[in-house]
Image (cartoon, rainbow, N blue to C red):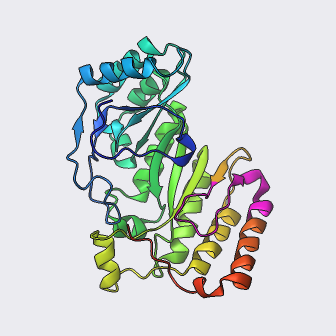
Amino acid sequence: MHYTGPVYRHPLEANTPILEITYGCSWNKCVFCNMYKDVKFGASPMDHIEEDLQELAGIYPHNLRKIIVANGDPFALSTKRLLEISSLIRKYFPEISIISCQTSIRNIMHKKQEELKQLAEAKYDDIYIGIESGCDEVLKQLNKGYTSKQEYETLKKLKNSKIKYIALLMGGAGGKKYRDEHIRDTAKLLNTYPPKMISIITTGIATGTNLAQMRDDGEFVQLTEREIIEDEMALIEALDVPNSTYFYGHHQNNVAKVSGHLKNKDDLIGKFKERLEYFENNQPEILDISLSREY
């Protein structure tokens, strides 16, 4: 397989095959991220893609239904290229029904409505989007490269194209300064354009990132573990999304690991309260500090 640098996928996709069609990240400027700092963004040659598909076809069944195209942001490619790749995938796996990927608002928003409909017809679906927040102040602080207005516009186009998305959120991304705004505005965005799944990860501060410098300079003040748990409960309480929407909170960065369908909001909140009570009774010292998540 032609994998260039690190390859990432969501924990729930551990058994889904990965096909590299881009490498690196087309933006690579978010203050918290060092995932692709040493990999220059580029597009995989079509001959490499076909060679990898041939290899995957020797491992996975002919009736494979789902594949992930990687790496950081495949939607940075032209629609024409993405359609060509879809055709190639279906040459080797004719029953593919979902071509998933991780992408960004920034690159989706540059695609026209008709292009997104074409991509939906070509089986692109269940795309993971690093929403992080629905709050303008937080988006600016994280240097995401887009505004909440552009989030709304882009998610509307996805809805009209019938492309489902998974919202990747960062717990505590607003820090102390924008704590309430982060929860309020993110819930508002998700309620307007509900995702198939909400996946939340507690904000980690990687060594050498701009966010680490912002923390050291006092520009970004991390939430305590208690505040993180309280905010996850507040977010769930504020959500008004379909019962089928899944909340995934089992990322390794999360102290309180809770997951479940949002039709059971009370049960989810109850589980968070149980975790909080457990820590109060067994590890009270961790609740009022910010645990190190440097990596």
Q: Residue at x 41, y 27 (%)?
A: 114
The quadrant in which the C terminus is found is bottom left
Is-magenta flag for residue 255? Answer: yes
Tell me if residue 194 can be seen: no
Q: Nearer the viewer, residue 155 or 22?
A: 22
Task: Tell me what residue is drawn at x 44 percent, y 52 percent.
Answer: 130
Residue 204 in the image: state x and y as whole percent: 43, 68
Image coordinates for residue 58, horizontal then vertical, percent:
44, 17
Examine the rendered structure and indicate whether residue 133 appears above or below residue 129. below
The x, y position of residue 219, in whole percent, is 34, 82
Residue 86 highlighted magenta (yes or no): no
Viewer-proximal residue among 219 and 290: 290
Q: Residue furthest front?
A: 59
Q: Is residue 103 left or right of residue 214?
A: right
Decide: is 86 above or below 283: above
Write the residue at 60% across / 87% down: 285
Which quadrant of the figure has residue 24? top left
95, 4: nearer the viewer = 4
Q: Which residues are magenta?
A: 248-268
Task: Answer yes or no: is residue 291 visible.
Answer: yes
Residue 199 x, y percent position in the rendering: 56, 54
- Reply above or below: 156 against 250: above
Could you tell me which quadrant the N terminus lies in?
top left
Which residue is found at the position 33% from the left and 47% from the top? 6
Instruction: Please indicate whether residue 294 sits to the left or right of residue 77 in the image.
Output: right
